[in-house]
Amino acid sequence: MENMNFNVKKSIWLYVAILSIFILLVPHVAFITAHVSLSSNEGWNAYLARRAIGLDHAPLYPPAEQMVFNNYPPSSFYVVGLFGWLLGDMIVAGRIISLLALLFCAWAAGRIVLACGGTLGGAWLAGLLIVLYSAVFYSDYVAMDDPQWLGQAVIMAGFMLLLGNGREPGRAGAWRPFCAGFVVVAGLTFKHNILALPVAVLVWLLLTDWRHAVSWMGGCLVSLCLLGGLYYSSFGPDFIQGVFGHKRVFYVHGMLKGLGNVLGLGGMMVSCAFVPWRRLPHRSGLLLGLYLLLAVASAIVQRTGAGVSHNACFEALIAAALCAGLAMSRLVTTGGTVGRVPMRAVLVGMVGLNLLPVVVSLPVYLPYLYRSNVTGIVHSLAASDETIAAVRAIDGDVACETLALCYWAHKPVVMDFFNYSQHVAVTHDAMVLERAVDRHDIAAFVSNSRFDTQEDVWEFLSLWRIIRARYTHVRQQGAAYIVTP
């Protein structure tokens, strides 16, 4: 009877968690087709997706003398491009794919917990933590047109393939690590900053099974040669220069942001004390420990880059959630006490600690999500549509800070404000913009900043100083300011 009551309580908490996720995701799904940009990345990804499938007759990796840059690998642009071609809107397609990829990562985390010897309850906890933390703390990447979750999903598929169901002796021969290595490198052609897991797997295999390590490296090498060779033959040196030679400003103090993000996962980190590291099958405890350590270090280092946001923390979130799921599995299946504390009390405390940041944040975040965020989008719809209509009516090329506005206005992309500002900051060379401004090659610039005085410009001040020298007329139109000669 006591076990039955305990199982009923677990089911109730599971339903509460699922209901919470539903409440958190509803606003993102409800506005998934809205013509309100959630990030400056959305329009940028949409334009490149159009280029990838040939809807825009411009190179996917532009030459250096342009003001449009592509520092992402190409695979995501083909996936989003094909789906967007079917839907008729690349941004909506990217949002849907991103949301599905997040849910897939949560499901994959549950499967990996099971493969490592965890229980079904531990698998549910791992998956739920990924979605809950993403929806509350990384909500700007939920259903946003960005390839980070898509790349993470492909790499998680490779992780599942590597571990299988955890019961095969010797991990089912050399074919499994070979195929897993192939898939993981393919995932890096969607987003190339997901490095913690591939490195952790390589080190783990070298320490535990060198034959499988050779097989893994063989799969990685074949995938690298096939996909890398294919993309290099398609795009030439501009592909290498765009992805690996991209100019970016780095700030050492960005590590503090990364450290803050990692500390936000502290509740799950405490779970590591209850993970049976040495008793997990196939020494997978060593793999998870390496994964968590490298993911945390990667998040802290990546946050030093300008423009790098919460997406740097996704690997740390997944690794910590896996540890939480395995810790719960151990506490559920182990009887006795910890000191004088009953194991079930420890279990409740551990799960509560995992959920504590979310529970504490919900009373503040939910009103913000439904009152401020949702209301803000509703109020912005008409203003955004007004801006889009005004941009569409302009005769000639238009450069938008928020590229989605120009995308929905069916204007070609002529300037990528963020990446070009990074290029100018590093090289101190703004000749392309100066020439375009002097010759009035661009009919108008569209900014989301204020223009009462020069000092009121919020972003890209170095670029706007050049623009405002020749473009002096400013009018507010809906959600943005349109700047013309």
Image (cartoon, rainbow, N blue to C red):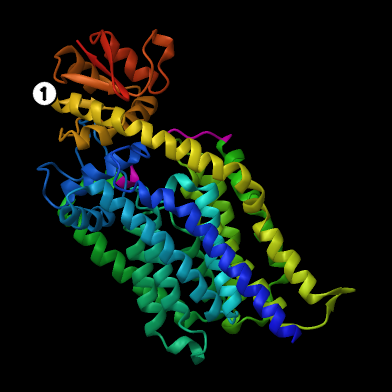
Where residue 113 appears, as percent x and y from the top left, is 55, 75
Q: Quadrant of residue 381?
A: top left
Please tell me which residue is depicted at 31% across the width and 31% down the height of the picture: 402
209 vs 340, left or right, is: left
Where residue 25 appears, as percent x and y from the top left, is 45, 54
Where residue 30 appears, as percent x and y from the top left, is 36, 49
Please tell me which residue is depicted at 84% across the width and 78% down the height of the picture: 337
Q: Which residues are magenta?
A: 243-253
Q: Is residue 382 visible?
A: yes
Extreme bottom residue here? Answer: 169
Circle 1: element type: loop
Query: Which residue is under mark 1?
Result: 396
Majority SS type along the magenta span: loop
Residue 395, above or below 299? above
**Front-lying residue, 371 or 33:** 371
**Front-lying residue, 315 or 293:** 315
